[in-house]
Image (tube, rainbow, N blue to C red):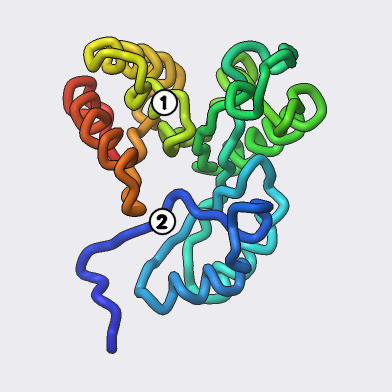
Amino acid sequence: MEADTSKSFTHLHCHSHYSLLDGASSIDRLVHRASELGMNSLALTDHGNLHGALEFYSKAKNVGLNPIIGYEAYIAPGSRFQKDAGSQKEASYHLTLLAQNRTGFANLLKLATKASLEGFYFKPRIDREILAAHSEGLVCLSGCLSSEFSRALIGSSREQNDSLNQGRQVASWFQKIFGDRYFIEVQDNGLDLQRQGTAAAIDLSNEMGIPPV
C-alpha cells in the first residue's frame, strides 16, 4: 500500500533510545518507519542530550529524509545555578528546541554542554539567561505536558483565567526571544490532560497569533 503524501506531516518531538527511561526506538527503526509512512523529514529531540545527532543525521539522509536535529531541554524555573528544589519535577520544565541551520546546531551544542557542566541538578538544565544568549538559529516549541507553558494552563489549583494569564506570560517571553520561530506545541497521545491543555493552548495560539504545530 502506497503512503499518502498529499498532506505532509513531520514529527517534531521524537525520542530515541538515547532518551533513557523514556524512548524505546533505535534511530534505525525511527528513520525507516518514517520513510515507510511517506514522510520527507523527521526531528530527533532526545531528553537533555545530543548523543544521537550525528547517527540520526547520517541514517536519515541514507533513507531520503530531511533530518531535523533537536533537543528536549530541561529548563530551570530560575537560575541554572540554583539547586535547592525539593523534587525533580520542581527542578525543571521541558522545552523543545530545533536547529534551523548550522548556527542553531552550534547553539544546541553550547546549551547542552552548559546544561551538564553548570546546571546539572537531577537533570542537565539550562535557564532563560543562556537560552536567550544562544537562541539564534533555533526554533522553539512550547513543549509537552511538563513544559512551563502547559503546567501553567493545567494547574489544578488555579482558576481558568489565572491559568490563561500565566500561560500568556510564559508564551510572551518566548515569543519576545524567538519571534516567528516560536510555536505552540500540541500533542494527542490519548491523555485527558493533553486534551485539556490543548484546548487552552489553541485559545492562546489564536489570541496571540502564535501558530500551533
Whichever of labels 1 and 2 marks the residue nearer the N terminus, that label is 2
Which residue is situated farthest in the right direction here?
Answer: 117
For the C terminus, the image quarter is: top left
Q: The residue tagged with tag 1: helix, strand or loop?
A: helix
Real-space Cα separation, disc 1 to disc 2, in angstroms: 22 Å
In the displayed structure, 142 sits above or below 43; it is: above
- Expressed as whole percent of the image width and height from the top left, the position of residue 212 reads 28, 38
Count of marks placed on residues: 2
Q: Image check: 29 left or right of 187?
A: right
In the displayed structure, 184 sits above or below 67; it is: above
| Amino acid tagged 2 | His
- Expressed as whole percent of the image width and height from the top left, the position of residue 107 reads 64, 33
The answer to which quarter of the image holds residue 7 is: bottom left
Q: Please say whether residue 116 is visible from this viewpoint.
A: yes
- Expressed as whole percent of the image width and height from the top left, the position of residue 14 reads 50, 54
Q: Which residue is under mark 1?
A: 151
Which residue is situated farthest in the front direction here?
Answer: 157
The answer to which quarter of the image holds residue 193 is: top left
Residue at image x 74%, y 26%?
A: 121
Residue at image x 26%, y 41%?
A: 195
- Expressed as whole percent of the image width and height from the top left, the position of residue 156 reads 35, 22
Instruction: Assess disc 2: are there few (<14), some (14-19) or many (≥20) residues with their C-alpha within 10 Å of its C-alpha.
Output: some
Residue at image x 56%, y 55%?
A: 15
Q: Please say whether residue 134 is visible from this viewpoint.
A: no
Q: The residue tagged with tag 2: helix, strand or loop?
A: loop
Q: Which residue is under mark 2?
A: 11
In the displayed structure, 40 sits above or below 186; it is: below
The label shown at residue 62 is none
The front one of 123 and 34 is: 123
| Amino acid tagged 1 | Arg
Residue at image x 28%, y 89%?
A: 1
